[in-house]
Image: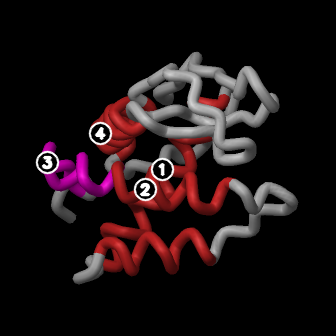
């Protein structure tokens, strides 16, 4: 069984789908700041730890994306797997290069948002001492 999120959100001004993961996050498409906040990064890290416990990997063997929250969970899992495999010495540089490697297919406005999100995820990873999983 995999961890799923019921979180869905879209900008009330332009309809873009994104997670306002902390206070001050603006819509990546139109810049609107709704004041809404959802702890998406924290939930994605809970999902990571749950999947590590269940599957010995933060990326489950199969995962259905049923909500915007699930999309963030899955994207975060792949980001963290790459991060833990790379063991970079410069988190900001790693985030920049990782996001630049993503194909956005018409959603290029999401690049700065994902960079900000992943930097926040890594801040939490260090604060909460999240690990790559069980020692092999």
Residue 78 at x, y = what percent? 50, 58
Q: In which quarter of the image is residue 87?
A: bottom left
Single out the mark in the foreground, 2 or 4.
Answer: 2
Single out the mark in the foreground, 2 or 1.
Answer: 2
User: Considering only order in the chain, which callout, 1 or 2, is on the residue closer to the N terminus?
Assistant: 1
- Mark 1 secondary-structure assignment: helix
Cα distance between the residues tagged 2 and 1: 8 Å
Single out the residue that lies furthest toward the right. 106
Mark number displayed over residue 24 = none
User: Considering only order in the chain, which callout, 2 or 3, is on the residue closer to the N terminus?
Assistant: 2
> Along the horizontal axis of the image, is 115 left or right of 67?
left
Single out the mark in the foreground, 3 or 1.
Answer: 3
Residue at 73% of width from left, 42% of height from top?
30
Residue picked out by circle 1: 76
Residue 54 at x, y = what percent? 35, 36
Residue picked out by circle 4: 49
Cα distance between the residues tagged 4 and 1: 12 Å
Residue 19 at x, y = what percent? 56, 34
Mark number displayed over residue 127 = 3
- Mark 4 secondary-structure assignment: helix
In this view of the protein, which residue sits in the foreground, 5 or 17?
17
Is 130 magenta? The answer is yes
């Amino acid at each position: 069984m995999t961890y799923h999120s019921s979180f869905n959100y879209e900008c009330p001004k332009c309809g873009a789908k994104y997670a306002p993961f902390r206070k001050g996050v603006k819509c990546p498409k139109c810049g609107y700041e709704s004041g809404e906040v959802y702890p998406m990064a924290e939930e994605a890290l809970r999902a990571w730890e749950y999947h590590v416990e269940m599957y010995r990997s933060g990326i489950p063997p199969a995962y259905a994306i049923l909500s915007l929250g699930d999309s963030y969970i899955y994207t975060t899992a792949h980001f963290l797997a790459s991060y833990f495999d790379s063991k970079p010495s410069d988190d900001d540089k790693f985030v920049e290069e990782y996001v630049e490697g993503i194909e956005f297919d018409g959603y290029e406005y999401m690049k700065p948002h994902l960079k900000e999100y992943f930097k926040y995820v890594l801040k939490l990873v260090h604060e909460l001492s999240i690990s790559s999983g069980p020692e092999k």
